[in-house]
Image (cartoon, rainbow, N blue to C red):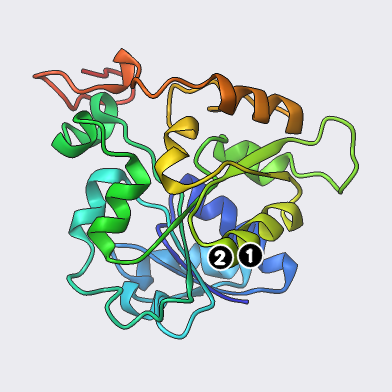
Amino acid sequence: MRIGIIGAGNIGGALVRGLVPLGHEVQVANSRGPQTLQELASETGASAVTVQDAVRDKDLIVVTIPQAKVEALPSGLFADVPGDVVVVDTGNYYPRERDGRIADLEDGTVESAWVEGRIGHPVIKAFNNIYAAHLHEKGQPQGSDGRIALPVAGDDASAKKVVLELVDALGFDPVDAGTIAESWRQQPGSPVYTTDLDVAGVRGALADASQQRPEAFTATPNSPGTYSDPR
């Protein structure tokens, strides 16, 4: 596939390193410009491009940037992206450590539904509940004992199928986690978040999730702080 990745942080970098060896044509972009991504491009064989080029003529686009930065994406970035292009949202809301207060999310809007509204394109929620190092290092062949399973949520069955298959190709058991409206089940603080469960464990964790956002993942009057000093 022709894949564009917006964001070259921990998860973005792990996906670049995982997808290029699978034979995909990967282009990666960030807010600082392709000149800052030459080391990653040289290491992986991906192409460093502008954000605008990362969404042009793609089969699949990954948005993997801080939640608060979604609104800073160029206006109309997805306006000409065809409706059948798969867009994956890996984002998480960390109000105390990074993002500050986002009123809609504090009021109960599901994170990926909020992203859909901001970019004007449906998304599939995936790769948000696993540590980047584990995404890069812990993939295993199908049928391996202890293979980690990852939840995938979305409303479009064909788009979700593409991402489920991609999860499997990267070395993880994919689990259909329902619709975007249900993707709160894999948000930070949920039982499936960063727990490296197998298929049965993921299904059980999704079922046990509470829609109430944990206090540690809600904003305070002093938010944001930092990861070492959340506020």
Position of residue 214 in the picture relative to residue 176 (left or right)? left
Q: Are marks 2 and 1 in contact (CB under 8 Å)?
A: yes
Q: Residues within 10 Å of mark 1 (few under 14, many from 20)?
A: some
Judged from the image, the secondary structure of the residue bearing numbered disc 1 is: helix
Residue 102 spot, x, y in % from top left: 17, 37
Which quadrant of the structure image shows residue 70?
A: bottom left
Q: Residue shown at 43%/49% (left/top)? A: 9
Mark 2: few, some, or many residues within 10 Å (few <14, many ≥20)? some
Q: Is residue 135 left or right of residue 50?
A: right
Depth check, front residue: 28 or 127: 127
In the orientation shown, which residue stands out farthest toward the left?
221
Relative side of 46 to 121, left or right = right
Amino acid on which the number 1 mark rests in the picture: Val
Q: Which mark is residue 162?
A: 1
Looking at the rendered structure, the kind of residue marked 2 is: Ala
SS for dot 2: helix
Q: Nearer the viewer, residue 12 or 193?
A: 193
Q: Residue 171's spot in the image, x, y percent? A: 76, 49
Q: Which residue is mark 2?
A: 159
Q: Quadrant of the N terminus?
A: bottom right
Q: Residue furthest top?
A: 215
* 219, 36: nearer the viewer: 219
* Residue found 51% across the figure and 62% down from its top: 156
Residue 51 vs 203, above or below: the answer is: below
* Horizontal and vertical percent position of residue 155: 48, 56
Query: Marks 2 and 1, how far apart in space?
Result: 5 Å
Question: Which image quarter is the C terminus in?
Answer: top left
Looking at the image, residue 120 lies above or below residue 189: below
Q: Which residue is depicted at the point 37% across and 72% down? A: 34
How many numbered discs sit on the rendered protein?
Answer: 2
